[in-house]
Image (tube, rainbow, N blue to C red):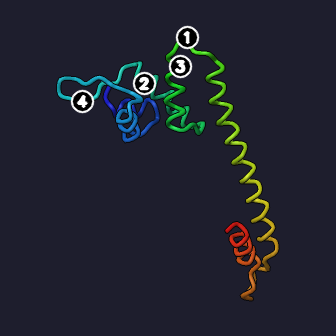
Amino acid sequence: MNISDAATQTGLPAKTIRYYEEIGLVTPSRNSNGYRVFGETELHKLTFLARSRALGFSIEDCRTLLALYEDQSRASSDVKRIARTHLDEIEAKITDLIAMRDTLSHLVQACAGDDRPDCPILKGIEATSVSKA
């Protein structure tokens, strides 16, 4: 199977597949004219990588997860540790996003949105940036 067929089957852009090859996540074979040939193993890895990236795992986490997936003597605790760390990061981002939403919501509600130059939103942003500097 060529790269465009692999892209269609896995839902990954060909550019991403080439990148994954460049960084050593997949190593498709090459036929006599130099074109990449993707077999079931490479398709499976690409699908695994696509799903891992969709869950927000970093490239390095994907590399580790793929290695663990291929290691039949792996400890599930190693996999869980990576997933738990990533989940903790997601939860921290959610907390930050909720705080951002609440702050922005308050600022939007405080703004009259009329023709006057006074703007609580700009003042709130200024106050926030000054306090974090």
Q: Position of residue 105 (x, y in %)?
A: 78, 65
Label annotation for residue 69: 3
Spot the residue most to the left: 33
Label annotation for residue 35: 4
Query: Which sits earlier in the primary sequence, circle 4 or circle 3?
Result: 4
Which residue does the image show at 54% across and 20% down from the upper left? 68
Name the amino acid, label 3.
Tyr
Q: Position of residue 131 (x, y in %)?
A: 73, 69
Q: State the residue position of label 1.
A: 73
Q: Is residue 48 left or right of residue 26?
A: right
Name the amino acid, label 4.
Tyr
125 shown above or below 67: below
Query: Which sits earlier in the primary sequence, circle 2 or circle 1?
Result: 2
Q: Is residue 86 left or right of residue 1?
A: right
Badge 1 marks a residue whose secondary structure is: loop
- Badge nearest the viewer, 2 or 3: 3
Q: State the residue position of label 2.
A: 43
- Badge nearest the viewer, 2 or 1: 1
Badge 4 marks a residue whose secondary structure is: loop
Badge 2 marks a residue whose secondary structure is: helix
Name the amino acid, label 1.
Ser
Q: Quadrant of the N terminus?
A: top left
Viewer-proximal residue, 2 or 87?
A: 87
> Looking at the rendering, which quadrant does residue 128 occupy?
bottom right
**Separation of disc 2 and disc 4 at Cα?**
16 Å
Which residue does the image show at 74% across and 78% down from the upper left? 123
